[in-house]
Image: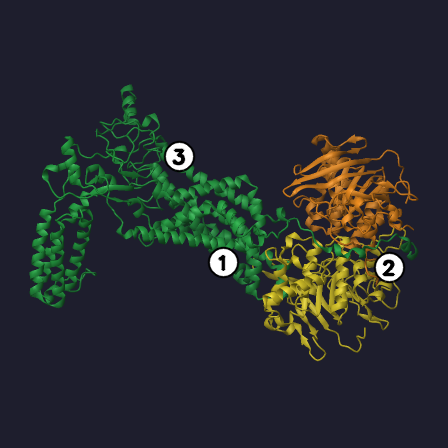
Amino acid sequence: MDEPSADEPLLAIEGLKTYFHTDEGVARAVDGVSYSIAPGETLGVVGESGSGKSVTALSVLQLLEMPPGRFEGGSIRFKGEELIGASEARMQEIRGDDIAMIFQEPMTALNPVFTVGNQIAEAVRLHRGLDRDAARAHAIEMLERVGIPAPEKRVDEYPHQLSGGMRQRVMIAIAMSCDPELLIADEPTTALDVTIQAQILELIAELQRKAGMSVLLITHDLGVVAEVAHKVAVMYAGRVVEYAPAAELFRLPRHPYTIGLLQSLPDLATAGERLTAIPGIVPSATRFPSGCRFRTRCPLATERCAEDVPALERIEGGAAEHTAACHHLDRVGGA
Amino acid sequence: MDGAIEKPLVEVRGLKKHFPVRKGVFQRHVGDVKAVDGLDFTVGRGETLSLVGESGCGKTTAGRSLLRLIEPSAGAAVYRPDADTEVDLFRLTRAEMRAYRRDLQIIFQDPYASLNPRITVGNAIGEALRVHGVVQDARERRERVAALLQKVGLRPDVANRFPHEFSGGQRQRIGIARALALGPKLIVCDEAVSALDVSIQAQVINLLKDLQAELGVSYVFIAHDLSVVRYISDRVAVMYLGRIVESGPVEEVFENPRHPYTQALLSAIPRADPGERRERIPLVGDVPSPIHPPPGCHFHTRCGIAERGLCDVAYPETRAIGDGGHRAACHFSAGKPAV
Amino acid sequence: MAESKRNVPRIDFESMRDAEAPEFASEYAKDYWDLVFEQLGRRWLFKTGVAVLTLLYGVAAFAPLLASDKPVSVQSVALGAYSKAVRVSPMASSALNTAKLDEAAYVAGLDPAAVDAPPSRAASVRAELDAAQLRLGTMRSMLAPDAEERASLEAFEAAFLEGAEALERGDGEAALEALGRAKTESRAIRKALKPLDPARADRGGVGLVARQSQPLYESIAAWEAFLMALWIAVATWPVWNRLVNGVLLRGNRYRVRAARRWKLVAVLLLSLVCAFAWRAHFGPVASFDSSDWKGGITDGSIVLLEEGRSTADLVAERAESGDAAPAGPDASDLAVWAPIPYGYAELHEDEKFRAPTWTARAELDPETGRSVFALASESAGDGGAAVAGVSAESNPVEIRAGELPLNHPWRHALGTDESGRDILTRMIWGARISLSVGILSAALLTLIGVVIGSIAGFFGGRVDDLIMRGIEILQTIPALFLILLALAFTPPGTIPPMFAVVIVIAVVRWTGVARLVRGEFMRLRDAEFVVAARALGFSSRRTIFRHVLPNAMSPVLVAAAFAVASGILTESAVSFLGLGIKEPQASWGGVVNESRNVDLWWIQVFPGLAIFLTVTCYNLVGDAIRDAMDPKARV
C-alpha cells in the first residue's frame, strides 16, 4: 500500500458539531469531530450504531433534515472551500460532481421507474452537459468499468431486474460517472453477502487506484476497514476516540474502546477462548455521560474521566498521525 | 462428543420446503421456489450445529420448518426427548405439536420486532409459563421471571418495563429469557446476533455459550457470519441453494474445506488484521434463482474447478472425508484437491 | 500471525460485569399509551381540535338547557289545565251508562278493533275512575289547602269509588245508586269549582294557588341527564385526573396506569348514578308536560303568580289598586327561561326567512310585520318584493313570553327559516343528530370492519379471497349512491331516521377499515413476536387477541377518527338531499336544506360553518393521532 502524499488535505473537518433537537432533548450526534482526508487516500470511519459516523458524512454533503438537525459549530473544508453556510446551489454543484455518495441499501437508493442507464446518464447530463447519445455511451462505459457483464444489455434494465450486488455496482457507477474527487461510501457492503462484499470492496479499491480519488468509508465492520483503508478514525458517541494508520491501529490500538472492539471480535484464529465483551450499552445521544463518554463502560475510568473531556493526543512511539483521546494512555498495556 | 454411542437429539432427513409460485387471475401453479431441497442433519444433545450460507440459501426456512413454524413439504425430523422416546415432529398434529413446543424454541434476528410492544417484559416471559400451566401461582411466576432475567444478565426489577425502553442487545437478552422460560432442549438461533453491534454481539455470544454450559441446551445456529460460527459451533453445515454442500466438525471444515464454495466463502471474510494477507478465491456472478437452479451441481456456474460434462450434468453425491464426520458434496472432494 | 496477535494491548473488561444494570430514560416504565399521550400533549393543533370538539359535544348534550320553549322555572297557575280538569262529569256519566248495561250487552258492544278496551263493566268503570282521579289530583294541587270546596271533591270521589267497588262485587243496584250520586256531584263541582280568571275577574270563581315548577328539567329524560353528566366528567378530566393521580394514587405511575381502566368505569358509573338521581327527582318523562308554556302565558291560560298566592289575592290586589290590566307576557320575573327561548320546532310564521337580527335588513315594522328594508327598497323603486321570502302581508308580529323585543339584535342571532324557526336553536338541536350520527356510524363501521378484516386476515386463502373480492365489488359502487338507494328503500317508520342513516352509512363504509385490519394482520402474521407466540405453543385465539389485534388497532383508531368526520359529512349530504332526518327534527344538513336561495345566505352559511368546523377538528385530531402512533417517531 503506497502512502499518499500528505500535503493539503482534500477534505478537512474541524470540530464539527451537528446536533438534533428532538422531543427528548438535544441529541449531540456529532460533537466536535475532526478528521481529514488527503487526495488519493482512503479513510475508514468505524463505530457502532449511534456513534455519529454517518451523520458526519451526511453533514459534509448537507443531506440532513434541518431542522431537527443543526450545525452548532466547526468547519468542513473541501479543497479549501468552506461548506458550512454554502448555498444550496453550490452544494448541488458539489454533490455528485466533486463528492459522490453510495448508500447501504442499493434497492431503495435507486429509482425503480427508470432504467439504470437513465440514472447514470442523468448525473453526467446534469453536471457535464453531455447530449443523450454521449450520455448513454458514457453509461455503458461506466457499467463496464464497475464490472457488469453485457453492459449494452444491462443499461436498459430496471433496478428490480438486478441482484443486490449488481445494484450496488450500479450505485457505484452512478457515483463514479462524474469522476468525483471524493467518494463517500456509507456502509456500502452491509446489506450484501460476504462473497459479494468481497467483490464490491475489491471494486472500490481498484477504482480508487485507477481514478486517484479519495474514499471516505463508513462501516461498523473492523474487518472491512482493515482490508481497504489507509487510515482509520474510530468514533464513539459522537466523537473520534482514536485516529491512526490502519496497519498501526490493528497492531497497536491505544484507546480502551478500540481495544475492547478488537477483543470483542470472534476471530477465525482464536476459537475456543471466551470473548471479552465490552459491558453495558452504547449511551443514547440525548444522555451522553459527562467527560469521557466511554467512561461508563471502561474499566480504567477514574474521577478525572468524568470531569475532563480527553483531547486527541499523539501516541508516543507510534506513527506520526496516531492520536487517541484518553486520560489513561499510559495505563494501557503496550507492546 | 460420543455421538456414536448416544443417539442425537434431533435427526432431520430429507427436509424439503417448496413454495409454490402462482401467477395470473386463476393462480396457476407455474413452479416452485425450492427454498430447502432435501436436507439431512443431526443435532446432538448440548451441541451447537450451525447452518451457514448466503441470503437465499434456505437456512432460515430450514430452521423454521424444523419447528414447524413453516409447514415442511417433505421429510422427517426424529426428535428424542429422552433415550427411549422417538417422535417424528413432522407427523404430529397441530395439537400434539403444541406439547412439544416447550422443548423447541427460537430466538430471532431483529430485536426490535421480536417483542410485542404492548406487553411488559415480565409478562412476555411469564405468559408461556402460565399458558403451559408450568407455574400457576402469580407470585411464584414473578419469582421465576426474575430468575430468568437474572440468568440472561438483566436486573430482575426490569420486569415491568416495556420493550421500547431497552437497547437492541438487552432486547435480545429478553428474547433469550423468553425462549428459556419453558426449559427447552433445543433452541433455533435465527441470525440471533447478526443485527447487533460488535461489542454487544460479543456479550450475547458469551451469554449463549454460558447458558449452553449450564443448561445443556442444543442450538441450531443460523448465521451468515463465519467468524461467529467458527467461534460458537461444534459442527457446521454450509448451505447453497437449498442444499448442504459441506458439513462436519467446525475445526475440520474451517481448516480443511473441501467444497470450492466453502473455500470461497472462507476466503472472502474480511479480517481485522491488515498484516494478514491471504489468497482470496474470487467468486464471479450471483447466486442463481432458486426457482430454476442450474442443472447438475448448483454451484457449477460460479465454480473455478467445474468440469463441463460432469458438474453441469450430475448433482454430486455427498461423500465422507475421513472418519470425523466431515462430508462434502463435490465431484472433486476427494480426487482433485481444489485450487 | 499469532505473534502479532499476542502483542496487541488487552484490557480486562471482565472486571466490570456489574455495569449491566440498564439505564432508562424515564424513572418509570412508559407503556404504549403513555407514549401516545405524551406525543399528543405536545401538539397544540390536537389540543385545540379536542377543545373545540368537546365544546361542540357539550352544546349537543346540553341542547335542552341552551335552547328551549319551556321555562327553566316558573311560578304560575295553569288556568287552562285546571279548566280541563274541572270537567269530571263525562267520566261519571260514562261510568253510569256502563253500569246500566248488563254484562253480556257490554261485552257484545265492545269494538273488536279496540285491543285495549276494558274487558268488563267493572274494569271500564275502574278506568273512568282513574281518569277522574287524575283530574282531581290536578285540581287539588291548585286549590288552596283550606278551601271548603275540597269537600265536594271528596264526596264525588267517595261516591265514584263506592260505585266501582259495588260493581266489582256484582251489586248492580248499589253501583247504580252510587254512580248516580257521583254524577250529581260532578255537575256541582263543575259549577262550584269554576276557576277565577284574573283577566275576567267579574265572572267570579274559585281562587287558585300558584305553585313553582321546572318544566324544562322535567322534560329532560334520564339518558339525556346521563350524557350531560358524562360530558361534565370528560370535560373536567384534566382537572380531576390530576387530583386523583396526585392525591389518591400519590403519583405512583404503576398505580396510575393500572387505574386507567377504573377511571373509565368510574366515569360511566358516576354518570349512570346521576341519570338515576335525575329520574328519581323529576320523575319519568312519561308525565311529560306537553303544554305550550310560551303560548299559554301569552294568551293568559297560564297566569304567572308568586308561589303560594292565589288568583283571588291577585284580583283583590288589582281591585284595590284600580289596575285591571291583565298579566302580560313580560309582566314579571316569575318565569326563568333558557338562554335561547325557542323550541327547535317552534313556529313564528310572522317572522319567516328573517335575516340575522343584528343586520339592518332584518328590521321589521312591529305594527305591520313588514320588512322595513323591503319597504325602503320598494320606495326607492327597485321592487322590494324582490327581497325573497319577506312577508308582504300586514300582520302585527306576536312576541311570546320570554322572548326578546322584535328588533333586538340577538332576537334571532342567526336568522330564521321558512317557518320562522330560529336557526341557532335548530343548529343547537341539530348538533345532537349530526354529532351522534358521526360517532355512532364510525363506531358501527369500525366494529364491522374489524370483525370482517380480522376474519380475512386470520384465515387467509379462500376466505380472504372471497371477502376481498366482495369488498372490491362494494367499493366500485359510489358509496353515496348506495347510501341514498338504501335510505330510499328503507320503509318509513321501521326505525327512527337517525338510526337508519347510521346503519346505512356503517353498512356501506366498513370496507376501508376491513382492508386496513386485514393488511395489519398480514403484516403482523409474520412479525417475529407473533411467530414467537406460535413457537411458544399459544393458541390461535390467544395469539390473535393478545398479540395481533392490539397492535393492529392503532391505524384503525386513526381511521375511526376520519370516519366520524366523513359520517357527519355524509349525514349532511343525505339530509340536504332530503333523505335523512325528517322534519321537524333538525340536523345541520337538514337546516342547510331549508333554502337554496343565495339571498337567504344565513340558512346555508352558519350550519355549513358548523359542519366545516367539526369535520376539520376531527381531521386534525385524526392526523395528530396518526403522528403520535407512528412507530418511527416512537422508537
Residue type at tag 1: Ile
Which chain's residue wears label 1? C
Q: State the residue position of label 1.
A: C452
Cβ–Cβ under 8 Å for marks 3 and 2? no
Q: Secondary structure at mark 1?
A: helix
In front: label 3 or label 1: 3
Question: Front-most of C277 and C381?
Answer: C277
Q: Which mark is residue C175?
A: none
Q: Nearer the viewer, mark 1 or mark 2?
A: 2
- Residue C562 in the image, given as x and y percentages of width and height: 49, 46
Tell which chain the image draws in yellow.
B
Distance between mark 3 and mark 2 Cα atoms: 82 Å
Q: Tag 2: residue type? A: Ala
The answer to whether tags 3 and 2 share a subunit is no
What number is the disc on residue A269?
Answer: 2
Q: Secondary structure at mark 2?
A: loop
Instruction: Please say which color scheme the image uses.
Output: by chain
Q: Mark 2 belongs to which subunit?
A: A
Could one spot residue C400 in this view of the protein? yes
Could you say whether the residue bearing mark 3 is in a helix, strand or loop?
helix
Tell me the shade of chain C.
green
- Identify which residue is drawn at 85% across, 46% down: A328
The orange one among the chains is: A
Q: Quadrant of the N terminus of chain C?
A: bottom right
Label 1, label 2: how far apart the Cα atoms are? 58 Å
Is residue B128 visible in the rendered image? The answer is no
**Residue B32 percent location from the top left of the image:** 66, 63
Name the amino acid, label 3.
Val
From this viewpoint, which residue is outermost toward the front? C146
